[in-house]
Image (cartoon, grey):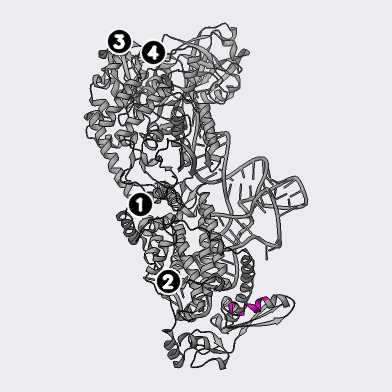
Amino acid sequence: MNDKNTAEDNDLAHKYKDTIDLPQTEFPMRGNGPVREPEIQKFWEEQEVYKKSIELREKEGAQSFILHDGPPYLSSDKIHIGTALNKILKDIVIKYKNQRGFRTPYIPGYDSHGLPIENAVVKDLKGGRSSISIPELRERCKDFALANLKGQEEKFKRLGVLGEWDKPYVTLDKEFEAEQIKLFAEMSEKGFIYRGLKAVQWSWGAETALAEAEVEYQDDHQSPTIHVAFKITKTNLKQAQGTSLVIWTTTPWTIPGNLAICLNKKVDYAAFETIQKDKEDNHKENNQKNLGKLIIATELKATFEKETNCLLTQVGESFKGIELEGTITKHPLYNRDSVIVFGEHVTTDAGTGCVHTAPGHGQEDFLVGKEYGLEILCPVNGQGVYTKEALSYKFKNSEILKKAAEKNQSLKQKLENRNADYSSEIELEGFHVTKQANDFIIAALEDSGALIKLGRITHSYPYCWRSKTPLIFRATEQWFASVDGFRKKALEEIDKVNWIPERGRNRIYKMVEDRGDWCISRQRTWGVPIPAFYNKNKLNDQGNPDSILDKEIIDHVAKIFAKEGSSAWYTKDIKELIPQSFFDKNPKVALEGLERETDTMDVWFDSGSTHRTVVAARPELTKPGEKFKPVDLYLEGSDQHRGWFQSSLLTSVATNGFAPYQSVLTHGFVMDEKGRKMSKSLGNVVDPADVIEKYGADILRLWVASVDYSIDIKVGDNMFKQLSDIYRNFRNTSRYLLGNLFDFDPKNDKVAYKDLWQVDKVILHKLQKLTGTLTENFDNYQFFKYYQVIQNFCSVDLSAFYFDVIKDRLYTHGKNSLSRKAAQTVLFELLSSLNRLFVPVLPHLSEDILSFTSEAIKDSYKESGFFAKNAGAGSSILLSNWPSIKDKYVNEELEVFFSELMQIRELAFKEVEELRQKKEIGKSLEAEIIIEAQKDKLEKLKNIEQELKQVFIVSKISFIEGTDLKLTAKVFQGEKCYRCWKLFDKEEIQNGICHTCAEAIS
RNA sequence: GGUCUGGUAACUCAACUGGUUCAGAGUACAUGCUUUAUAAGCGUGAAGUUGCGGGUUCAAGCCCCGCCCAGACUACCA
């Protein structure tokens, strides 16, 4: 081991230290994103980089690449990590495509109408929603939405997302609304819009019908369960005479709507003599009750006995359900028939095999009711309260009702408010279905003797996503888009779209194939009004005023909306909303008999119409002189298969006849580090704002680029810590490049390819390959491959290999030596490429790198195609071109040479490491490597002896001819050059330094 | 409940249509070196029963069946 710490050592080392060419740069080692990024973003804004990025490409005559933004919802001014992911993915695509020379307008959008906003606003109203007028309420909703828009916009910008932030699209824009109802009119013209009665999922909490998307199921819903006997009053089947059918239901409040009992034609039924044991009274002798003969499905006998505490004894032959055709029973509460019908949905999984059927209160019931021509009776209003049609009931035993009222205070209250005597005839009108009606009906059934058993069940039940109240089924009149009218075309179009990943195609295909008609109307205030009128003087089949949906009127209204916004619908006189020409053409319609529609459109219709209201309407998004065509890309979370992708597809196919997009890319959902869903209760929610505050936006963007977004995406602090390390590696790689290029002027210093060393050529080759791979990865939207590949290049090829190997040349060979300039030539190519390759994912880092790049190098960029044409001096890195592959640097042969070299290097390092472990050496320059190899191989290696020493970072290599390749290392007993630190034979050192060094400083 | 997707080292990803040897990289970790990228850099090392259990095959991380876990979508039990 050489002595290191003598005074002489220090003197000499100090003497020569100033003569070596160490890297020089101010580029900070740490990114300090939280502070530095906002500065960079300010620079982008001041430079109007977004605007320039479009204009420069336009001047080049570029093709457009249109990524149409799906609008996030404005219910909050914060953004979710999933939204951040989405926006960053979009921005990566846009930035990349722009670098590739495309004209890439990006117009951010916002979804501003709908229930959640309305609810939030109403919640803050002191006097409730009725305390202010509709236009006032709408005004507040608008303010609320726009305030949130400001908040979200700020956060999106902070992500480094570039776009038309000054002119985003918002679904509440006047022009947007005007175009939207025109689109609606067009669908109506084509016969795709109709008004119909439907059993819809109804939220009494929100007083509206809900779209499928707005329904959520709760698993722990508790319901009462009742077994109820319906006396048969007329039947042709002998076994059924003098018996009752038993139904089972979990919604007692639907009993007033009962019009039928549904059986399965093929299921076996039988009448049973039924004895019920009274549980509480079972010591007494008299603890049994004879319930008479009851009919249920035979298969359910045991279940029934258990559930109702009964003992069943079959009477007579069993029979198929079909044999009860024509049978009539009596409603247990009213003097009304309940007829027997049949349906396939009746199973023997649960209940009694006899299904209580209220056509106004259930999907299946509704369909069966229609099939059998039953009245669609729905005695419940929008608030979930019985109407007059629910009739009345008089208790024989008023004690039963009294007891029920004691248990249910709200029922008691209701009864007392009415001053009702418990024994009088009680109108059901005014009872709320879940709050009072259930208990009342149960009591009434008990009183009438029809109630066999009351129980409780915990099951999953649909709830309103906003008001969190249980849903009911209600048959109501609604506006629909008839998907049947264009389903076939829509499916054809799905197959023409490029779905990324491919399975997205199957998903949306099946959804569109199976879906029913699209219920478009919402009984809400905050939305685009459905531009329809009702004629009180003409009634439809349901006895309701006839509806008018007329293109001429809508076009007229659209003009008003375009000028004043859609609130005009509520503030203007009807007279102003309808053009005179309409009355001229329809002389039978009188103005006095008309009422305006109060429903608004489903918000999915708002966003689903953006291909018309935004893409076709904004000149930036259509190429000058070009007709509207499907945009290149929609990019959203996979939940949008049922949402935006579908609503956009449907409205576009219905009106344009084609899909609004050529490609659709979907990403998965963001989970926590363990792959669990994020939820407030688990406390595992990652807030993008926190990440930015702690690590900066580039780290967040790097995370986006590092994960396979096609499946579930995990996120957590550990990941960000690791990403920071990778980021630091990128940063230090850049810092090394900048530092060692401080004196390099590409104009004068570039070294010809033939004068480069082998390792230089290898790296240039690898850089070309890297560029090729990354281009491919981006073209295929495989960002995580980009991340892996570029990371590997920076740490393995550069940091651990090339940068280490060329240090001796850079630092000691002399400022203007060919070998130093050769290495710098490569570093220059690396800087020029990497700086731009970082852009899509790490724009801030890229800008930072450029700003610390020497003027000489920046000058050379101007003419080299580094930037978009005409980008001008002081340009942002965001105006750069994606690096292209330089064929002159591609050299496949070197690839083989390189991998061999790396293998040998590995062997050498292992040997050297052994010496180090034995404490015989410190740095590898203190070692000598002895290579033993076959003659021809040995010759090859001998030829590049100088280079090999650099590659192994040792001071000497000896060659011995042998059979197999073998490397050994030993301590090199030489003298140290105090300038370059390599060891030499004693006689080669003069004044403490070697010949080469002496030459370098002479 | 149904359909679909995924499960490879602590983390992010590899392993072409089943086939070169103990399933590979990077990061993290351990450890040594360096003080000439220095709040940096380099070397070396350990780390995986490829979710579990069967099966097909000369051969399975990859194909088949079952199960477990996670997620998404969809439906709803009257």
Q: Which residue is mark 1?
A: A52
Badges 4 and 2: C-beta atoms under 8 Å apart?
Answer: no
Dot 3: chain letter: A
Q: Mark 1 to mark 2: distance in Å?
A: 28 Å
Q: Is residue A645 magenta?
A: no
Q: Which residue is mark 4?
A: A542
Categorize mark 1 by other alpha carbons within 10 Å: few (<14), some (14-19), many (20+).
Answer: some
Q: Amino acid at mark 4?
A: Gln
Question: In the image, residue A257 lies at what x, y percent?
Answer: 42, 16
Q: Which residue is mark 2?
A: A745
Dot 1: chain letter: A
In the image, which residues are magenta?
A940-947
What residue do we see at 58% from left, 77% from top? Answer: A947
Between A878 and A429, which is closer to the camera in this rendering? A878
Quarter where residue A692 is shown: bottom left
Q: Mark 3 to mark 1: distance in Å?
A: 57 Å
Q: Are marks 3 and 1 on the same chain?
A: yes
Q: Mark 1 to mark 4: distance in Å?
A: 60 Å
Q: Which residue is mark 3?
A: A587
Closer to the chain start, of discs 4 and 2, is 4
Q: Mark 4 to mark 2: distance in Å?
A: 85 Å
The answer, for residue A765, to whether it is visible in the render is yes
Q: Amino acid at mark 2?
A: Asp
Between A359 and B74, which is closer to the camera in this rendering? B74
User: Depth-wise, is mark 2 or mark 3 nearer the camera?
Assistant: 2
Please indicate whether residue A928 sits to the left or right of residue A28 in the image. Answer: right
User: Depth-wise, is mark 4 or mark 2 nearer the camera?
Assistant: 2
Q: Mark 2 to mark 3: distance in Å?
A: 85 Å
Between A279 and A762, which is closer to the camera in this rendering? A762
Badges 1 and 4: C-beta atoms under 8 Å apart?
Answer: no
Q: Are marks 2 and 3 on the same chain?
A: yes
User: Depth-wise, is mark 3 or mark 4 nearer the camera?
Assistant: 3
